[in-house]
Image: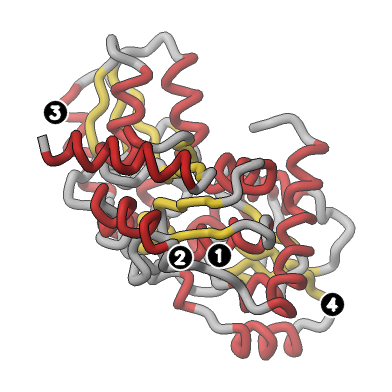
């Protein structure tokens, strides 16, 4: 009953504010259900760049809202919980990246979008987990490539593309909780299944999987596959979308404990309050935003010129 009241208040305010609600695949189910668009970072950043709405409520973590603000500087971008950060994004600073660049003057920097605006501003091109391989392949003529901040995604890309990358030693603490033993246990328990894992997982987990895919790619793969049973090696929030889109198929989390506490900070109440108060509002400082935008635009240009993976 309370939820229904909150939902209708959100809908009313959304119209009044000319707002769109974007939710990442890892958000709690009730948040995904009230969102206009649910997707991965790439889908959401594209949508943020093209929306006509004056207000974007970004249900995710800070770097995602910041990316939306950089791509849409004339819109109000709200992050319902201002403390929803990303530990991996905090594992590198702009200063540390500048130092690394000085050590490798011929290198270009590829920066995973799971990073701060300041770090993006020091980078040449961004990537998401869905397009990282395409982005690095597009740099075939470049002498050296620095990849920040996720060493596991970087390792995955390096093996796919067949070239060495200079990797920053960052990682996602949530995906680090998924272990090879979880995959072995799931195979023993569920029998004939397809194991899909995210490239933020460690190498032995990726090697034990059938497919290594971003969350958007997992959704597409599950829809198109004739298989019925899937073990999902990523944040379990994705299972809500997978189950909704594939009611006849079965999805099991590789490790149900591998939840991201930051992604779970969003609630219906916080969405409502953010629309009422038009806060917390996220923006990047102008100069940083302009430079970060160049790296994001470079990524979107590569993605648009290649067919989706
Ligand atoms: S799942 Fe990992 S990378 Fe994504 S927001 Fe949480 S900590 Fe950051």
SS of the residue under disc 4: loop
> Residues under labels 4 and 2: Cα distance?
31 Å
Residue that carries the numbered disc 2 in the rendered image:
62
In the picture, the quarter occupied by the C terminus is: top right
Q: Are marks 1 and 2 in contact (CB under 8 Å)?
A: yes
Q: Position of residue 209 (x, y in %)?
A: 38, 37
Q: Quadrant of residue 248?
A: top left
Does the rendering let one see residue 183? no
> Residues under labels 1 and 2: Cα distance?
6 Å
> Residues under labels 1 and 4: Cα distance?
29 Å
What sort of colour scheme is used for the picture?
A: secondary structure
SS of the residue under disc 1: helix
Residue that carries the numbered disc 3 in the rendered image:
189
Crowding around mark 2 (Cα neighbors within 10 Å: few <14, some 14 to 19, many 20+) is many
In the picture, the quarter occupied by the N terminus is: top left
Q: Position of residue 292 (x, y in %)?
A: 71, 69
> Nearer the N terminus, badge 1 or badge 4?
1
Does the rendering let one see residue 221? yes
Q: Nearer the viewer, mark 3 or mark 1?
A: 1
> Residues under labels 2 and 3: Cα distance?
37 Å
- Is the CB–ligand 1 distance for label 4 below 8 Å? no
Residue 106: mark in rendering = 4
> Residues under labels 3 and 4: Cα distance?
50 Å
Residue at image coords 38%, 51%: 204
């Amino acid at each position: 009953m309370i939820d229904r009241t909150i939902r209708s208040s959100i809908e009313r305010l959304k119209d009044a504010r000319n707002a769109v609600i974007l939710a990442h695949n890892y958000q709690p189910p009730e948040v995904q259900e009230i969102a206009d668009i649910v997707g991965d970072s790439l889908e959401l950043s594209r949508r943020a760049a093209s929306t006509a709405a004056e207000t974007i409520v970004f249900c995710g973590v800070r770097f995602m809202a910041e990316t939306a603000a950089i791509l849409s500087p004339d819109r109000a971008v709200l992050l319902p919980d201002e403390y929803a950060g990303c530990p991996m994004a905090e594992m590198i600073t702009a200063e540390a990246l500048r130092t690394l660049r000085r050590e490798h003057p011929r290198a270009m920097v590829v920066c995973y979008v799971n990073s701060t605006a300041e770090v993006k501003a020091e980078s040449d091109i961004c990537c998401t987990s869905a397009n990282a391989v395409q982005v690095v392949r597009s740099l075939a003529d470049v002498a050296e490539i620095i990849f920040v901040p996720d060493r596991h995604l970087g390792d995955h890309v390096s093996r796919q593309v067949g070239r060495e990358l200079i990797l920053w030693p960052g990682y996602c603490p949530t995906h680090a909780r998924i272990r090879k033993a979880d995959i072995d246990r799931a195979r023993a328990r569920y029998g004939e299944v397809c194991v899909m894992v995210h490239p933020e997982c460690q190498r032995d987990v990726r090697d034990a999987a059938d497919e290594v895919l971003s969350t958007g790619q997992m959704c597409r793969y599950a829809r198109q596959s004739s298989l019925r049973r899937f073990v999902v090696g990523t944040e379990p929030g994705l299972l809500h979308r997978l189950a909704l889109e594939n009611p006849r198929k079965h999805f099991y989390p590789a490790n149900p404990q591998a939840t991201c506490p930051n992604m779970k900070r969003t609630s219906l109440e916080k969405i409502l309050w953010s629309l009422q108060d038009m806060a917390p509002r996220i923006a990047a400082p102008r100069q940083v935003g302009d430079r970060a935008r160049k790296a994001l635009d470079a990524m979107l240009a590569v993605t648009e010129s290649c067919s989706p993976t």
